[in-house]
Structure formats: structure tokens, C-alpha cells
Amino acid sequence: MDDLPINDQLTIPAAELSISFARSGGPGGQNVNKVATKVDIRWTPADSAVLTEIERRRLLRKLANRLTTEGELLVISTRTRDQSRNREDAREKLAEIIREAIKPPIIRKKTRAPKHVAENRLAEKKQRSVRKTDRRSPGERD
């Protein structure tokens, strides 16, 4: 298996990836019973030598619910009836998951509503109050 390119700066070495094959359910007829087309790719981000400490923490935090009890990220593909296409599909899925997980979070810039927005809201409240007061009968008004 080849190294897995994630982006321009990050490539997961093939030695860190573990791949296994099994018989797959789904489409394929009798082929399903004979050929191991299901692909499982496992990668342990905590032990990876190519991640920076920041990327590792971010990845472990974002993918915590996807990791096995051993800390492995497991990606499975059974999309096609062909083992090689499933292998490529699983590699693409893994790369996309990692790419999304190591993205730095977008920091929200604090903004403030313009003064006229608050003034308009208060003016509308006042108008609504006056309108409701005018609906009352003269004896009910305070």
C-alpha cells in the first residue's frame, strides 16, 4: 500500500496504516460468498509520527466518538464489488475525515449591534404599549 496524502503538508506513511479484507454483504450475488471485497483501514492517530502536537490534540478531540477503545480510527468500505475500488474508496474516506478533523477552528469575531437597532426596538415596544393602552376602555386605564 502507498502513503496516504492528506494535504500539501501532511502525508500518512503506509507503515502507519493497517488494512484488512473480509467478505462483504450487499450487492454481488454469489461473488459475495467467494471474494473478500470489504476493506477495513485502521490508523492510530495518537501514535502517528507525522502529526504535530496541535494537530494530534485537535484530531483526537474531534474524532473521539469515532475511535475504537484501542484509539484506532477505523474506516470501512463495501461500496463496490471490487476490492481495489473499495480500497481506494476507504483511503479517500480516511483522508477526508483527517482533512476535516485537522482544520483549525474558525474564530468568531465579536460584533456589536449598532445603537440604532436597540433604539428602534425600544421605540417599537413603546408604540405597541401605547396601541394596547388605547384599546382599553376609559375606566380600565391607569
Image (cartoon, helix red, strand yellow):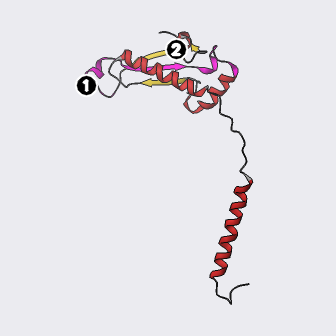
Quadrant into which the C terminus falls:
bottom right
On the image, the x and y values in percent for residue 5 come to: 53, 15
Q: Which residue is mark 2?
A: 4
Residue 122 location, quadrant: bottom right
Residue lying at 28% horizontally and 24% vertically, measured from the top left = 28
Circle 1 crowding by C-alpha within 10 Å: few under 14, some 14–19, many from 20? few
**Contact check, label 2 and label 1, Cβ < 8 Å:** no
Circle 2 crowding by C-alpha within 10 Å: few under 14, some 14–19, many from 20? some
Residue lying at 49% horizontally and 9% vertically, measured from the top left = 2
- Please give left or right for residue 30 compared with residue 129 in the image: left
Closer to the camera in the image, 12 or 132: 132
Residue 32 location, quadrant: top left
- Stretch of the chain drawn in magenta: 25-53
On the image, the x and y values in percent for residue 130 come to: 68, 75
Q: Earlier in the sequence, mark 2 or mark 1?
A: 2
Residue lying at 38% horizontally and 15% vertically, measured from the top left = 84
- Please give left or right for residue 71 compared with residue 34 in the image: right
Q: Which residue is mark 1?
A: 29
Q: Disc 2 and disc 1: Cα gap in Å?
A: 32 Å
Closer to the camera in the image, 71 or 84: 84
Given the image, on which type of amino acid does mark 1 rest?
Answer: Gly
Q: Is residue 139 magenta?
A: no
Given the image, on which type of amino acid does mark 2 rest?
Answer: Leu
Q: Is residue 29 magenta?
A: yes
